[in-house]
Structure formats: C-alpha cells, structure tokens
C-alpha cells in the first residue's frame, strides 16, 4: 500500500515524451522539440499507491457499515503551476501538488464527510469511520467490485501539463509582452500571468461505478497599462480552456493582446454615461456573467430545495419571453467548464433550464435529484477532495434569438451597451445584483455614439430575465478564465450570451442637471 518517496520520483522520471514548440516561438531561444518526463499515469492512485478495486471496496464497506442511501470516494491528484512576468522579469513562479481522497456518506437529510491526504489503508479506513458516524439504519450494500466506465474524450492532451516545463512556457509570456508593447507607443507596462493544471480524479460510487477522468486546464492573462500625459488607463484580457500547449497559437495570443490593448486605449476617449433607468444592451459573450450570477445560481436545485430561490415554485411557469432559452451544458469540448463526468461520477450532459421562456429544470446533484424524484443532471461539483459536492453550473449560456444585433441597437432611443465587466455582487436567493462595467458604449437615436467606462448596473436577475425584449442571433461563449464561487468553493466555468436587450435597468453614471 505504501510507496517510498524515491520510488515515487522514479516512477515520474521514467520514460519520455516529445513536446513540439510552436513555430512562432522558435526565435525565443527554445528548442523546436523538447524531451519531457514521463506522463502522469491515467490512474495514479492505482499505479503509484496501489489503490485497486479490492482496496476501494474495503474502504467503501467501512464507510457504509452503519447504513447509507448513497456514498462515494473521490480521489484527486492535481498539479498546478503559475508564472508571472512583469516588466520583462519573472516576478513569481509557483508549483504545487494536491492529493487525497474525500469520503462521503448520505443518510436521509444528513451527510457525513471526511478526507485524508494519506492514501494508505489505515488512514482511509479511519476517515471512513469518521464520515460514517452520522449514519444509522439500513441502506445499500457496498459493492465488492466496481464497473469502470469509459474515459471521456472532451479534453485529451498529447503531453500533460505536468510534463511541460517553465522553459517552454516562458517564451509564450515574453511573446505576449512584446506583442502588447509593439501595438501602441502609449503602452507603459505589461503584466502576463500564466496558469496550468494537470488533474486526475477517480470516483467510486455505492452503486458500483468507477470513474476516472484526466482534467487539463490552462489560462493566460495580460494586463496592459497605458499612459498619455498624466492620464493612466488599465485594461486586460485572458483566454482559458481545457487545452494543451499547442493551443497557444500566434493568432490566438495576438487576438487576446489586441483585445486588452483596445479595451485600454478606448478609455482615454470614454466617459461616464448619464445615470438613471434606461434600456441596457448586454453585449454577446462576456455578458454571460449576468446570466450566470443573477439567474443561473437561482436555478441550482439546492437553493430551490431549501426554498431560498425565487424559482423554487416556478417549474412549468413562464419566466421569460418565448424566444429565451437558457442551457447549462458540460459537454462542450475543451471549454473551461467542460466535464466528462461530474464530481459524483455521473455522466455530464446538457440541461435546458429555460425553454422558450418556460422554466423546465433545475441543476441537480444526487441529493436534490432523489428528493425531487428525478435523475441527476450531472451537476454535482466540488472544489477538491476536501469538499462535499453540490449543484453547480458548468457552461451556461442563452441560445440564439430571432433578432440581429443591428436591430437591437436601432430599437434603442437612449441607452447603453455593456461590454466588459470587472466586479459584481449578487444576492443569490432573491437575485438582486450590482455589476461594474469597465467598458461599454452609449446608444442614442438607434446609433452607437460614444464609448463609456466605469458604470454600475443595478437590477434583479428574475426581473431582468422577464424584461429581455430582444435576443440576437450571435450567441457565443466567452473564452475568459471564469471561476465561480459558492459556499466557499471555487470551480472553473464557462458562460456566454447573445446580444440581448433588457428593456429597463438602473445605470449608475453621472447625474446631469
């Protein structure tokens, strides 16, 4: 059961793989092909620590000895790396490994949970006994063997991030920095942030399923500061996905940098709009943050099961106009929020929450699904093995509508377009929200007339959903590195929206006498 540190490191060093460098980085002082260490095995828990089916069955039996309605073991091995390049200097470089198993048993309304970083039999059995202390009564019999489910193919990598070294990543950061500085002489400072993660999970369930999933993740962020005289403006952009190193093409990185520079420079011309209630156009893509925060959370089943969501008695009722359809779909290949399986071992899928204006479904984990008499929607998620899962979003978006962006703009006599966002607060139960809009546009007499900046928009999610009067046919997911926080847990998500017109929203701009 135990493995010595020297033997563990030997496993990691054995073998090799070839990492091919993108052609546009060949002038940055790196080799076109680099030999890297052996890839982490698909199931490190079995390969490195001997956690086989017999071991898993023994721990599951201990976990459910006092009874269980459902139970699971969540093994996780995650290696994360980060780099920061500021003013041409690497100011930070970090690497960490998180590993352990979380043990959950559910009996009625009670959940017992424990975790351990030590994957030896005594430690796992001790954690199992701790979690099972809340259980009493009859329940399912623990399986003696497990049925391995097929690995998914939503995000495969030829060379895992755990085997891509800093010498390969640093040229990407330098390219981004140099590209940003070359775009305008007013660019004063550039900071580039890199993050990657190589995560392996194994989930054993009381009903005898065994799920393994390899979850890569990467993100690059560029922050640009420009100076014109005494005026200084800052903007940013980032891209993220469950991708591999080759995803960072010259075109993709250049597009990201140009977006950051454009967002920064337009602020020298921008002003704050007049304050008051007015029509608000939510730009396609990043405006999905409003859909996610102000509306999507209210459709997670735990809030509705507890009666804290305004949608708790709205299934089958109209919540929006007939051209509004809202979906949560984890099966979009390589998206940041994509998942082959959720963190309870359920196959992830597509859940239509609002269809043609009618509330059709909540997002369910196993606990809420059982209480509603439904099947889970594959929405049980957790930050790590240290946490119990709960219903969460993955890739949340609104589908295309019948209008065009130009039609929407032409319909507005006096209003604003919200384009990029930096901060926000949401009261999840009621859906009241405030968002800070960094970049946007003023619309007057059906035309875009001037850039705006530093705007607060205030509203209520369910009310804003009802007030959507036009939806364009330009839906897209935003490629930024969005992370969702709920009950102290953070998970990666994706979100998107078409261009949408909300007939009335409070805009915090300048008071004009």
Image: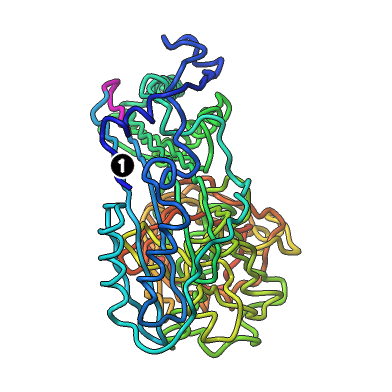
Q: Residue 284 location in percent, x, y?
A: 59, 54
Disc 1 residue crowd, few under 14, some 14–19, many 20+, Cα 10 Å: few
Task: Say if the magenta span includes residue 86.
Answer: yes
Task: Say if the magenta span includes residue 176.
Answer: no
Q: Residue 317 location in percent, x, y?
A: 64, 87
**In front of the other: 123 or 335:** 123
Q: Residue 345 location in percent, x, y?
A: 52, 62
Regarding residue 70, the answer to whether it shows in the image is yes
Viewport quadrant of the C terminus:
bottom left
* Residue at disc 1, secondary structure: strand
- Please name the residue that numbered disc 1 is placed on: 97
**In front of the other: 288 or 30:** 30
Judge whether 185 appears above or below 43 on screen.
above
Single out the residue that lies furthest toward the right: 402
Q: Residue 56 location in percent, x, y?
A: 42, 59
Q: Residue at x 40, y 62 (%)?
A: 435
- Magenta residues span 83-89
* Dominant secondary-structure state across the stretch colored magenta: strand
Colouring scheme applied when the structure was drawn: rainbow
Examine the image and state in which quarter residue 124 appears.
Answer: bottom left
**In front of the other: 205 or 174:** 205
């Amino acid at each position: 059961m135990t493995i010595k540190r020297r033997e563990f490191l030997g496993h990691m060093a054995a073998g090799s793989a070839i990492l091919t460098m993108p052609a546009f980085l060949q002038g940055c002082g790196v080799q076109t092909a680099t030999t890297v260490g052996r890839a982490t095995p698909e199931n490190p828990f079995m390969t490195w620590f001997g956690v086989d089916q017999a071991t898993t069955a023994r721990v599951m039996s201990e976990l459910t000895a006092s009874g269980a309605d459902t139970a699971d073991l969540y093994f996780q091995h995650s290696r994360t790396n980060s780099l920061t390049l500021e003013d041409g200097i690497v100011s930070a470089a970090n690497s960490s490994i998180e590993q352990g198993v979380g043990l959950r048993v559910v009996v009625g309304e009670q959940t017992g949970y424990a975790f351990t970083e030590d994957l030896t039999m005594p430690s796992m059995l001790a954690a199992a006994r701790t979690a099972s202390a809340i259980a009493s009564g009859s329940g399912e019999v623990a399986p003696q063997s497990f049925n391995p489910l097929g690995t998914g193919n939503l995000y495969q990598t030829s060379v895992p991030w755990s085997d891509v070294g800093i010498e390969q990543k640093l040229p990407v950061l330098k390219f981004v920095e140099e590209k940003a500085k070359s775009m305008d002489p007013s660019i004063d400072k550039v900071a580039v942030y890199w993050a990657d993660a190589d995560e392996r999970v194994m989930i054993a369930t009381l009903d005898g399923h065994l799920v393994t999933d390899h979850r890569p993740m990467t993100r690059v962020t560029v922050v640009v500061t420009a100076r014109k005289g005494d005026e200084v403006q800052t903007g940013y952009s980032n891209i993220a996905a469950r991708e591999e190193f080759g995803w960072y093409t010259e075109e993709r990185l250049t597009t990201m940098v140009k977006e950051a520079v454009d967002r920064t420079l337009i602020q020298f011309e921008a002003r704050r709009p007049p304050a008051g209630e007015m029509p608000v156009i939510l730009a396609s893509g990043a405006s999905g943050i409003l859909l996610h925060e102000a509306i999507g959370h209210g459709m997670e089943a735990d809030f509705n099961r507890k009666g804290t969501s305004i949608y708790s008695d709205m299934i089958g009722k109209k919540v929006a106009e007939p051209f509004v359809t809202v979906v949560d779909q984890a099966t979009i290949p390589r998206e940041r929020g994509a998942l082959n399986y959720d963190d309870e071992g359920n196959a992830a899928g597509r859940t239509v929450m609002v269809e043609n204006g009618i509330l059709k479904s909540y997002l369910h984990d196993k606990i809420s699904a059982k209480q509603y008499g439904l099947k889970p929607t594959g929405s049980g998620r957790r930050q790590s093995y240290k946490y119990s899962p709960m219903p969460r979003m993955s890739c949340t978006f609104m589908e295309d509508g019948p209008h065009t962006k130009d039609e929407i703009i032409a319909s507005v006599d006096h209003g604003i377009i919200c384009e990029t966002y930096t901060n926000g607060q949401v009261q999840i139960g009621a859906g009241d929200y405030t968002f800070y809009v960094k970049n946007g546009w003023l619309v007057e007499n059906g035309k875009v007339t001037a850039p705006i900046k530093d705007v607060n928009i205030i509203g209520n999610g369910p009310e804003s959903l009802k007030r959507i009067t036009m939806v364009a046919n330009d839906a897209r997911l935003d490629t930024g590195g969005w992370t969702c926080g709920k009950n102290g847990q953070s998970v990666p998500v994706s979100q998107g929206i078409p261009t949408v017109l909300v007939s009335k929203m409070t805009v915090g701009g300048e008071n004009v006498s």
